[in-house]
Image (tube, rainbow, N blue to C red):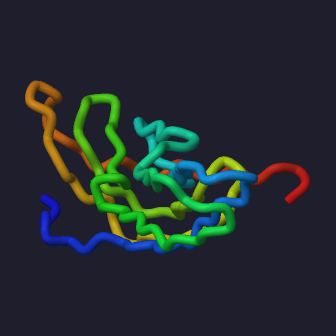
């Protein structure tokens, strides 16, 4: 099982009100993964954090923080068991991608939570990479 004391990954970002008047500004933080395991279908992109800054003056810049918890990286298999899986993960800020960072988890799949009634958990197996004719 995973230790709840695992460190979060922190990102800070400057956001600026580029509009013509004082306004609220919202920044959205998304996570996507490139994991390839049987019985696991990660979402294409998921919101993991956001911030809403109030009454920002025209041209004002503020520093905001986003935190990626290991819980944001957990994937659920078809039996309901939750796993932390090795692979590449990408953080993007806002839909127009004002910031992007990719990191990789290495190691073996780790069981985070066993689903009651889901049977005995079996570590997900990596999907075999199939080479295409162009590779």
Q: Position of residue 132 (x, y in %)?
A: 82, 50
Q: Position of residue 95 (x, y in %)?
A: 66, 47
Residue closest to the far right: 134
Quadrant in which the C terminus appears:
bottom right
Between 77 and 28, the one nearer to me in the picture: 28
Between 121 and 105, the one nearer to me in the picture: 105
Is 82 situated left or right of 87 in this image?
left
Q: Using the image, determine if residue 45 lies above or below residue 13.
A: above
Q: Position of residue 27 (x, y in %)?
A: 54, 53
Quadrant in which the N terminus appears:
bottom left
Q: Using the image, determine if residue 109 lies above or below residue 114.
A: below
Q: Quadrant of residue 34?
A: bottom right
Task: Count the labels in the image.
Answer: 0
Q: Using the image, determine if residue 26 lies above or below residue 14.
A: above
Between 35 and 98, the one nearer to me in the picture: 98
The residue at the point 52 percent across, 61 percent down is: 89
Residue closest to the far left: 116
Is 76 situated left or right of 23 in this image?
left
Is 92 situated left or right of 110 in this image?
right
The residue at the point 19 percent across, 52 percent down is: 112
Is 91 situated left or right of 107 in this image?
right
Residue closest to the far top: 117
Look at the image and tell me whether residue 131 can be seen: yes
Between 96 and 108, the one nearer to me in the picture: 96
The residue at the point 42 percent across, 39 percent down is: 40
Q: Position of residue 70 (x, y in %)?
A: 30, 61
Look at the image and tell me whether residue 101 can be seen: no
The residue at the point 46 percent across, 68 percent down is: 64
Q: Using the image, determine if residue 90 lies above or below residue 126.
A: below
């Amino acid at each position: 099982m995973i230790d709840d004391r695992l460190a979060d990954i922190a990102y800070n970002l400057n956001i600026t009100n580029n509009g013509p008047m004082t306004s609220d500004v919202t920044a959205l933080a998304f996570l996507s993964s490139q994991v390839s395991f049987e019985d696991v279908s990660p979402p294409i992109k998921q919101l993991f954090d956001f911030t809403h800054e109030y009454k920002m003056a025209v041209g004002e810049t503020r520093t905001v923080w986003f935190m990626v918890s290991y819980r944001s990286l957990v994937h659920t298999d078809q039996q309901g068991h939750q796993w932390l899986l090795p692979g590449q993960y990408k953080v993007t800020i806002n839909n127009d991608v004002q910031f992007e960072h990719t990191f990789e988890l290495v190691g073996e799949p780790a069981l985070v939570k066993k689903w009651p009634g889901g049977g005995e958990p079996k570590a997900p197996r990596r999907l075999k990479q199939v080479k295409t004719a162009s590779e």
